[in-house]
């Protein structure tokens, strides 16, 4: 029997999820809910009770509505819940969700889909780890010129009153979560946001430096630069660079010139990654992960819930501490 899916939201990201649901053989869409808009779709409804008849519900509504929907569903619905990131927008809501029963945590999933992306695969692949040695440093560069487009000026991303730190809430949060999932709690951090394009009142650029127990990471994210999606991973015995859909692996460390001085290690592998498709591929895999658990009635590992909330909490505290 196919899993019956309800979704809160009907356009933008919700539409991506709806299209992916249509391709999954284990489920089918049962309801598209919006509290007041009359959506032109045969499955559209303005009655939230219609969601309670589903086996799983996806929350793909504005960020500030997530908490209320999570609580409402936990109180009135016995099925599985997927909520888009960030889970919530204030620290008091974080505290409330951490206190819910484990049985509810097992059925609640926050959709940090880049946990299923190429960077996650690299830092967990034994082949790469063998060549890299112990990972010491990860540098992530993410950017494009959105802040210079005309439609940015009046968008929610540009509104500093509502979304002052939108660049980290929409872009950097994925990578902070991925790093915390793999390397634990952040011991030290540095956060430097800026308005570069001067086309909005939100920060359009940010640099975050994170120290973990054994790894240091740097994230640069911007809406005010040419397109870039580059990663560098430095280990004790090798280096990986990901740029323009290619992975370059250099090693080993002990490369010398004729005088016995260290030189840059040679290129030993080059692979095509198709990083342009990474977002949709990882989104599909993340949704499949959730649907698979819901379809089988399996508990979702509680670490996904706890770390998803912890990364959300860390970024909220970082924003609150910024002066």
Image (cartoon, rainbow, N blue to C red):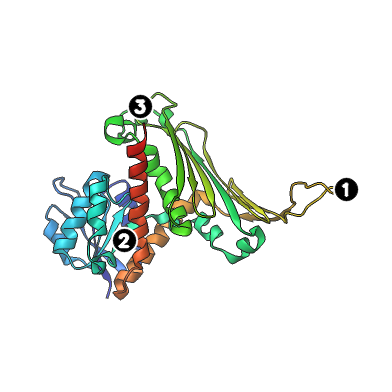
Q: Nearer the viewer, residue 233 or 44?
A: 233
Q: Answer with mark 2 or mark 3, whichever residue precedes in sequence.
A: 2
x%, y% of residue 306? 34, 60
Tags 1 and 2 in contact by the CB under 8 Å rule? no
Q: Which mark is residue 109?
A: 2
Q: Quadrant of residue 244?
A: top right
Which of marks 3 and 1 precedes in the sequence? 3
Residue 222 x %, y %: 46, 35
Circle number at residue 63: none
Quadrant hosting residue 1: bottom left
Is disc 3 placed on a helix, strand or loop? loop
Q: CA distance from mark 1 to mark 2?
A: 56 Å
The residue at 31%/75% (across/down) is: 296
Callout 2: SS? strand
Query: Do labels 2 and 3 touch, CB within 8 Å?
Result: no
Q: In percent of the image, x 61 and y 58: which residue is there?
A: 134
**How far apart are the alpha carbons under marks 2 and 3?**
33 Å
Quickly name the residue at label 3: 200
Q: Report whether residue 115 is seen.
A: yes
Q: Nearer the viewer, mark 1 or mark 2?
A: 1
Left-right relation of 163 to 145: left
Q: In the picture shown, does residue 220 fall above or below 119? A: above
The alpha-carbon separation of the residues under discs 1 and 3 comes to 55 Å
- Residue 230 left/right relative to 316: right
Residue named by callout 1 = 258
Between discs 1 and 2, the one toward the N terminus: 2
Figure check: 118 above or below 244: below
């Amino acid at each position: 029997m196919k899993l019956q899916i309800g979704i809160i939201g009907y356009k933008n990201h919700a539409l991506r999820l709806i299209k992916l649901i249509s391709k999954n053989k284990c489920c089918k869409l049962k309801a598209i809910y919006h509290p007041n808009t009359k959506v032109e779709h045969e499955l559209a409804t303005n009655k939230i009770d219609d969601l309670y008849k589903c086996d799983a519900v996806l929350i793909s509504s504005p960020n500030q509505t997530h908490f209320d929907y999570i609580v409402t569903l936990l109180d009135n619905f016995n099925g599985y819940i997927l909520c888009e990131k960030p889970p919530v927008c204030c620290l008091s809501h974080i505290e409330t969700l951490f206190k819910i029963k484990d049985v509810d945590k097992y059925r609640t999933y926050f959709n940090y889909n880049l946990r299923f992306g190429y960077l996650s695969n690299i830092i967990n692949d034994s082949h790469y780890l063998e060549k890299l040695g112990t990972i010491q440093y990860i540098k992530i560069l993410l950017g494009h010129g959105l802040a210079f487009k005309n439609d940015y000026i009046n968008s929610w991303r540009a509104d500093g009153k509502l979304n002052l730190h939108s660049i980290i809430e929409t872009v950097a949060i994925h990578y902070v979560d991925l790093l915390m999932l793999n390397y634990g709690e952040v011991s030290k951090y540095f956060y430097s946001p800026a308005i570069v394009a001067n086309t909005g009142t939100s920060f359009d650029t940010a640099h975050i430096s994170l120290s973990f127990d054994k790894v240091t990471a740097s994230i640069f994210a911007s809406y005010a630069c040419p397109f870039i999606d580059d990663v560098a991973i430095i280990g004790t015995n090798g280096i990986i660079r990901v740029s323009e859909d290619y992975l370059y692996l250099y090693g080993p460390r002990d490369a010398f010139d004729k005088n016995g001085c260290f030189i840059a290690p040679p290129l030993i592998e080059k692979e095509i990654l198709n990083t342009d498709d990474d977002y949709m591929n990882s989104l599909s895999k993340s949704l499949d992960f959730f649907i698979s658990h819901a379809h089988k009635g399996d508990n979702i590992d509680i670490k996904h819930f706890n770390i998803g909330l912890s990364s959300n909490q860390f970024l909220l505290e970082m924003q609150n501490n910024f002066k």
